[in-house]
Each structure stands twice: as C-alpha cells, then as structure tokens.
C-alpha cells in the first residue's frame, strides 16, 4: 500500500492552521510532502525559497515530512512523488465549494489519486495567510497564529506590506 500524501498550498506564509493539517497528515501517512506552489502569476510576499525554508523550520519536528516546491499541475507533481492522496484543509463551509471543484478536476485528470479533506481545529477556522498579512500591515500581533520564525519573517517584510 502506498503511504505518500501531498499537502499542497501557497503557504504565504505558513500559519498554525496549515501546521495543524500537516501534523495530522504526518500522523496518518508514512511520508508527507508539503508542496509549495510556485505560481508565476501570483505575487507572493515571500519567495518560493523563503516559503520552503519557513515550512522546513516549522515541520522539522515531524518525521516523514518533506518540503518541496512545484509548478504546473498538482496531479503531475503527486504522480512524480508517488503519492496517491492529496490532503486539503477545510476551515469553513465557504472553502468547500472551491475545494470540491478542484478535487473533481484532479480526479478527472488523475483517477488514481484521491483527495482527502481534513477539517481544521476550531481555533484555526478563521485563520488565513491573508488575514495574518493584514494584521501585520496594520500593526496587529500575529502571536498564536504563526510560529515565532514566521512572525519574525513577517516583521522583516512589514514595510512591503504597508506599500
């Protein structure tokens, strides 16, 4: 049986909500690949290399977790990694429609790959990378929403957020 899962996302930046899902995936699968989307169309705050490094630090305590980046179709990346499962986190009902559409598209493109949804813990149900960046932009605290390393990295880029 294949025990490889992919946890994809942009992770700009990684939040404790993301880590909740990654930790639970790591406890379920023998190998979990955190896949950082390198999308040239988007303009992330952190470079792909920075996002990968922040994720490596945040997941260093998790055996079997690897952080990699990819471009292109997620199902192609999953196949290349030998994964049969894509893990997607759900915070609220509003996430479901887009995630469901994406899962059906991926199923059409790669029938052998399953999508599994994990519902985040309630204390993270409101948390998003966008919200974290907004808090930093306006001088709010992000303690308890991100790791200390991510908080430090956000503060270093605060000026960029305020433009």
Image: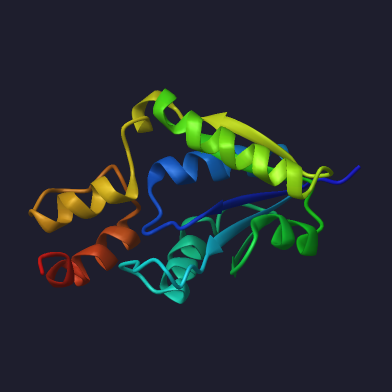
Report how many numbered discs are placed on residues in the image: 0
Residue 59, given in percent of the width and then of the height, sits at 53, 55
Direction from residue 16 to residue 36 in the image, left or right: right
Is 99 rendered above or below residue 8?
above
Direction from residue 141 to residue 42 in the image, left or right: right
Residue 65 figure quarter = bottom right
Residue 114 figure quarter = top right
Is 162 rendered above or below residue 118?
below
Is 13 rendered above or below residue 50?
above
Residue in the image at 81% along x and 43% along y: 111
Report the front residue among 96 and 33. Answer: 96
Residue in the image at 38% along x and 48% along y: 15
Residue 35 figure quarter = bottom right
Residue 151, given in percent of the width and then of the height, sits at 26, 58
Which quarter of the image is occupied by the C terminus?
bottom left
Tell me, what colour scheme is on the image? rainbow
Residue in the image at 65% along x and 60% along y: 73
Direction from residue 75 to residue 112 in the image, left or right: right
Residue extending furthest toward the right: 1
Which quarter of the image is occupied by the N terminus?
top right
Residue in the image at 31% along x and 57% along y: 148
Residue 90, given in percent of the width and then of the height, sits at 49, 32
């Amino acid at each position: 049986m294949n025990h490889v899962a992919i946890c994809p996302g942009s992770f700009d930046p990684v939040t404790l909500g993301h880590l909740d899902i990654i930790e639970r995936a790591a406890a379920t699968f023998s190998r979990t690949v955190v896949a950082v989307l390198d999308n040239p169309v988007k303009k992330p705050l952190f470079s792909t290399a920075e996002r990968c490094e922040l994720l490596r630090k945040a997941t260093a305590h998790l055996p079997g977790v690897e952080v990699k980046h990819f471009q292109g179709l997620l199902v192609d990346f999953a196949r290349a990694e030998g994964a049969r499962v894509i893990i997607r986190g759900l915070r609220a009902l509003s996430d479901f429609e887009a995630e469901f559409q994406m899962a059906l598209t991926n199923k059409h493109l790669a029938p052998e790959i399953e999508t599994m949804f994990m519902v985040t813990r309630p204390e993270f149900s409101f948390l998003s990378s966008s919200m974290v960046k907004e808090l930093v932009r306006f001088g709010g605290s992000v303690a308890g929403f991100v790791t200390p390393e991510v908080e430090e990295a956000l503060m270093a880029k605060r000026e960029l957020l305020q433009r």
